[in-house]
């Protein structure tokens, strides 16, 4: 009886190809981790998922008072200033929450990482899904505000998914990079809240980025768009309240988003093999 022979062929680059296939094979784990994070987020809380409404609502009220009343940025136009602020707050809340959750996701799942093999990229990706759920709840609040103010958005709101995708990409890219750094350098967990806090003030959440151009010129506004969330916020306002979009700034922000995605994925993959040892 003839024995069957097997030939082993080793090809360069196969590990990377298999890695992305493994992500699909482990999709059930992605669902499990996402659902677990959603339940844990609101477990043993007094009002549960209502926190996803209360936080942006209170922030919107504060920003409306500070920038609209004290800063005199409310022009009393056709669009209520509260909706203008909330349109900028929506993507920022998504980004800031996703960055915080993804940045600490590997440390929070250290027991899982040291015992079982699976593509580690699943962990920060699943944590970002929780932030997306919060975003969806907050978007419902925006719809309620539109009904309350009897405001109907124009047809460009159909383009909103494009800017939601941009928000997801910058959250994913920056989240991968920071969570990989957080595994190696534990003091990064103290830096993440600082980044979020500073980012809020250099992102046009409570005001229009056109104010930058009016006061400092177009060149400054273009450099201001190096903050990738500037183009995203401008895009949200373009879709929701019809505010003219600054296209050079949008392309600048888009380029930065793509850069962060590439750098984030590459650095994460480069350091992934050492996660179990460092944790």
Image (spheres, grey):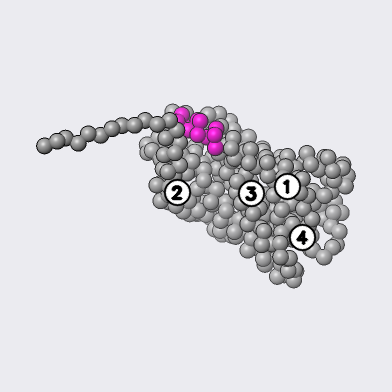
Nearer-N-terminus badge (1/4):
4
The residue beneath circle 3 is 166
- Circle nearer the viewer, 3 or 2: 3
Residue 275 horizontal side relative to residue 49, left or right = left
Give the number of the disc on residue 30: 2
Q: Which part of the image, by quadrant, shows the N terminus?
A: top left
Q: Position of residue 165 (x, y in %)?
A: 61, 51
Bin the neighbour count of mark 1 within 10 Å (Cα to Cα): few under 14, some 14-19, many 20 and up.
many
Give the number of the disc on residue 250: 1
Nearer-N-terminus badge (1/3):
3
Q: Quadrant of residue 135?
A: bottom right
Nearer-N-terminus badge (3/2):
2
Q: CA distance from mark 3 to mark 4?
A: 19 Å
Nearer-N-terminus badge (1/2):
2
Bin the neighbour count of mark 4 within 10 Å (Cα to Cα): few under 14, some 14-19, many 20 and up.
some
Q: Which residues are magenta?
A: 265-276
| Secondary element at tag 1 | helix
Nearer-N-terminus badge (3/4):
3
Q: Is there CB contact under 8 Å for labels 1 and 2?
A: no
Residue in the picture at 75% in, 61% down: 241
Q: CA distance from mark 1 to mark 4?
A: 15 Å
């Amino acid at each position: 009886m003839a024995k069957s022979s097997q030939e082993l062929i080793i090809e360069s680059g196969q590990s990377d190809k298999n890695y992305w296939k493994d992500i699909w094979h482990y999709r059930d784990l992605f669902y499990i981790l996402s659902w677990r994070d959603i339940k844990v987020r609101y477990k043993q809380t007094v009002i549960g998922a209502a926190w996803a409404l209360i936080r942006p609502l209170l922030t919107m009220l504060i920003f409306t008072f500070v920038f609209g009343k004290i800063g005199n940025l409310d022009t009393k136009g056709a669009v209520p200033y509260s909706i203008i602020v909330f349109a900028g707050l929506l993507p920022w809340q998504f980004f800031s929450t996703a960055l915080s959750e993804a940045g600490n996701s590997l440390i929070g799942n250290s027991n899982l990482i040291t015992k079982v093999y699976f593509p580690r990229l699943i962990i920060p990706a699943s944590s970002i899904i929780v932030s997306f759920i919060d975003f969806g709840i907050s978007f419902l609040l925006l719809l309620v505000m539109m009904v309350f103010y009897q405001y109907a958005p124009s047809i460009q709101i159909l383009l909103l998914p494009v800017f939601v995708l941009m928000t997801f990409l910058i959250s994913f890219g920056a989240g991968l990079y920071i969570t990989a750094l957080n595994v190696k350098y534990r003091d990064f967990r103290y830096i993440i809240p600082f980044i979020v806090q500073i980012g809020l003030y250099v992102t046009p959440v409570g005001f229009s980025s056109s104010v930058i151009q009016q006061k400092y010129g177009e060149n400054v506004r273009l450099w201001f768009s190096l903050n990738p969330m500037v183009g995203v916020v401008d895009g949200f306002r373009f879709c929701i309240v019809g505010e003219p979009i600054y296209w050079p700034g949008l392309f600048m922000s888009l380029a930065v988003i793509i850069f962060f995605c590439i750098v984030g994925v590459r650095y994460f993959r480069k350091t992934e093999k050492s996660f179990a040892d460092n944790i």
